[in-house]
Image (tube, rainbow, N blue to C red):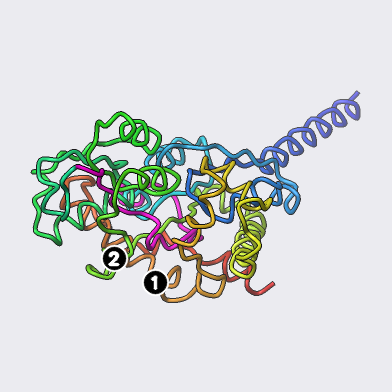
Amino acid sequence: MKKTLHALALAASLILTGNSMAASKEVVIAYQDMVVPWRYAQEVQNLEKKTGYKVTFRKLASGADVIRALASGSVQIGEAGSAPIASGLSQGLNIQLFWILDNINDAEALVVRNGSGIKTLADLKGKRIAVPFVSTSHFHALLALEHANVDPRGVKILNLRPPEIAAAWERGDIDATFIWDPVLAKVKKSGQVLITSGEIAKQTGTATFDGIVVSQDFARQNDAFLTELVKLLAATDDDYRSHKVAWTADSVQIKAVAKWSGAEAAEVPASLALYEFPTLQQQASAQWLGGGAAKSLAATAAFLKTQGTIQTVLPDYSTGVNATWVRKAAAQ
């Protein structure tokens, strides 16, 4: 009888252990509508094939939504801009930036409606400009106004998510927006670019980027998975950089990017060209995960605090940056 009970206990233990292992091989990744090469890897399920994990991709409307999902534990990995990442770290969220998805450069821009009479940043006074709050475009919109000596309190800044911005633009409810593709491509059709994030970065010395962050609890238990994810991200970006001419509107790669981002395939090649995608070697360099990203996050947080968006600025943001998996991927 004791042997039977022992056998049952052992079997139960194995079942529980097996369930725990199975559970640990599942991950929910939050993504947004950014137009990036990584979307092709999502389409062909390369991550699932490489790791054997059950991967669920959840599309969220803004970086702030991604940060909230990470805080709640409903996702383990997520894409967000440098501004929401800085905000999340400032609030004590247990996350780490481990991959620079893109250097935003000219892929985010302030577009003004044709006929609005807006020719300069000063002309925005009294006008309605829509941005997703606590996003990189929100940060750069405020920074551009400050740099041009325009009081943001005199501008009607509306908090709208990208799909809401597209709808508001169509209705004629807003005069301007600071946004990214695919909405950027849509508003350009009836508007003019006043300034881009790349230009603001050159003027102010503060660049913005999109990154991928991970819950530290998940990271501690899934080291090999994160290394494989980084290898896949690097390979997909490298394929784009090396074969841009093949990434045409009718290619499987561009069609996948369009499908996952909600963009028009014909507009995707031009959209991709606006970004810079750091190589695996550049990721770990002083420009990015080796120091530059932490400095950018600190500068972003300091500015957001002056605007009342966050309450606390950390003494050091390097604790929220981890190049471990980039270095491991580069060594393999």
Q: Is residue 99 left or right of residue 122?
A: right
Which residue carries the number 2 mark? Answer: 199
Which callout, 1 or 2, points at the residue further toward the start of the chain?
2
Q: Distance between the residues labelled 1 and 2?
A: 22 Å
The N terminus lies in which quarter of the figure?
top right
Numbered circle sitting on residue 291: 1
Instruction: Name the residue nearer the viewer: 154 or 90.
Output: 154
Residue type at mark 1? Answer: Gly
Quick check: 244 above or below 155? below
Q: Percent x, y for residue 310?
A: 23, 46
The C terminus lies in which quarter of the figure?
bottom right
Q: Percent x, y for residue 205?
A: 26, 70
Q: Which residue is drawn at 17% across and 45% down?
A: 308
Q: Percent x, y for residue 112?
A: 25, 47
- The magenta segment is 88-115
Residue type at mark 2? Answer: Glu
| Labels 1 & 2 near each other (Cβ < 8 A) | no
Q: What element carries label 2?
A: helix
Q: Which residue is drawn at 47% across and 49% down?
A: 34
Numbered circle sitting on residue 104: none
Q: Percent x, y for residue 225?
A: 66, 54
Q: Is mark 1 on a helix, strand or loop?
A: loop
Quick check: 167 above or below 190? above
Quick check: 7 above or below 103? above
- The quarter holding residue 169 reads top left
Instruction: Name the residue nearer the viewer: 210 or 124.
Output: 124
Instruction: Name the residue nearer the viewer: 209 or 246.
Output: 246
- The quarter holding residue 201 reads bottom left
Find the residue positioned furthest to the front.
Answer: 115
Label 2 packing within 10 angstroms: few (<14), some (14-19), many (20+): some
Magenta-drawn stretch contains 202? no
